[in-house]
Image (cartoon, helix red, strand yellow):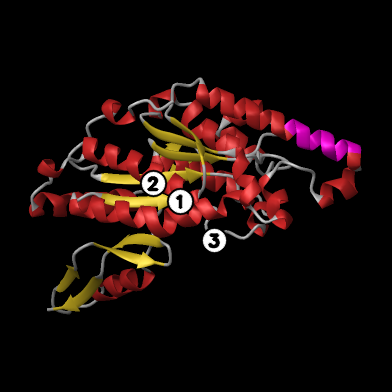
Amino acid sequence: MANSSAQKAHPPSPLSRAIRIFVSSTFRDMQGEREELIKRIFPELHKLCERRAVTWGEVDLRWGVPDEQKAEGKVLPVCLDEIKRCRPYFLGLLGERYGWIPAEVPQELIELEPWLKDYPDHSITELEILHGVLNNPEMADHAFFYFRDPAYIDSVPRGEQGDFREIPSREEMERLGRDRAERRAEERKAKLNSLKDRIRTSGLPVRENYSNPRQLGELVLKDLIKIIDALYPEEAKPDPLDQQATEHEAFARSRAVVELRPGEVSGVYIGRPDYFSRLDDHARTDSPPLVILARRIRMRQVGPRRKLGAEVSLRSS
C-alpha cells in the first residue's frame, strides 16, 4: 500500500524552505538501515535540496547513541521534542523487534504529554510513531513507513540473529525465569503485530517487505524526491536575495525560545557571554562607536550532522 503523499503536500510558506525529517526505528536490528540512510541516501537528498535552495536536515537519535543513555531516562523526552520540531516529516522503520520498553515514564513528562498515561509498557519506538503520526493524522502528509521482510534474518550470521528477533534476553531469563521471560517476549511480538496492523489500516504510505538496507535506501530516496519535487519544484527556486532572507529567518527561528505552555518551552538559545561582556564594557566607556559584523549564514558539517551557523565579530570604529 502506498498512497501518493506528494499529491497531498501542503504548499510551503515563502519562509519555510526547509525539510527536517525524523527517523524512528528499533535500536539493535536497524544499524544497517541507519548507516545506509545516513551515509548514502541523506547526502543525496541534501545535495538535491541545496540545488533547490532548501535546507535539509535529518534526526536519527539512535545514530551513535550509547545504550547507557536509555538507562538515564533521557531518550524519550528528547525523542518527543525532536518529533515536534520535525513535523510533518517522519520515517518509520520496523522489522521483527518491538524495541526497548522504559521501566516507567517520568511524571513530569506525562504532565506535558498526558496521552502517555494511556500507553504504559509500550516501546519507545511505538511511542514515537504514536506521537509523530498516529495520534496526529493531520501531520501525516509526509510520513512514510517501511517494513522489512522477515526472511532477511536468514541472511544474518547465526550468532547475531537474536538481535533481529523478539526473544527473551539473558538478563530477562535470569531475572524472571524462562517461562515468564518467554511470555514477555510473546507479549512484545503481539504488540509489534498490533502496531503494524494499525499502521497498515491508517491510510499512511507503507512499503512492505523490503529485502535489505540497500533496497530500503532506494525506496526512501524515491519517496522523498517526490516530496521535494512537489513542494519545491526546480522552476520555483527563489532568487538569491529571497533565499538569503529565508536563511536568516530559518536561523532566527532555530534560535527562538517560545513558551508553549507553562513549564514547557521550545527552541534553543546559545548564548555568547564573551560578546555580552564586551558590549557591556564598551557601553560603560566613551570609546568610539562599536560595529557588529555578521558573516553570511552557512551550513557546516559536524560528524554526521549538519549545523546552521553564523560567524560574528565585534570591532570598534
Location of mark 2 (residue): 218
Residue 112 at what x, y percent from top left?
55, 35
Residue marked by disc 3: 64
Three-letter residue code for mark 3: Gly
Residue toward you, 172 or 55? 172
Examine the image and state in which quarter residue 216 appears.
top left
What residue is drawn where x is 56% and y is 54%?
A: 31
Binning the other alpha carbons within 10 Å of mark 1 as few (below 14), some (14 to 19) or many (20 upward) gives some
Q: Give neighbour class at mark 3: few <14, some 14-19, many 20+ (Cα, 10 Å).
A: few
Q: Tell me the element at label 2.
A: helix
* Residues marked 2 and 1 touching at CB (< 8 Å): yes
Q: Earlier in the sequence, mark 3 or mark 2?
A: 3
Kindly tell me whether residue 269 is visible in this rendering.
Answer: no
Q: The C terminus appears in which quarter of the rendering?
A: bottom left
Q: Please name the residue shown 57% across and 50% down the image.
A: 30
Compared with 157, 300 (above or below) is below
> Going by the image, does 41 lie left or right of 202?
left
Specify whether residue 30 is painted magenta: no
- Residue 295 position, x and y percent, is 19, 68
Q: Which residues are magenta?
A: 179-187
> Where is 153 relative to 312, above or below?
above
Q: CA distance from mark 3 to mark 2?
A: 23 Å
Label pair 3/1, CB-CB below 8 angstroms: no
Label 2 sits on what residue type?
Glu
N-terminal of the two: label 3 or label 1?
3
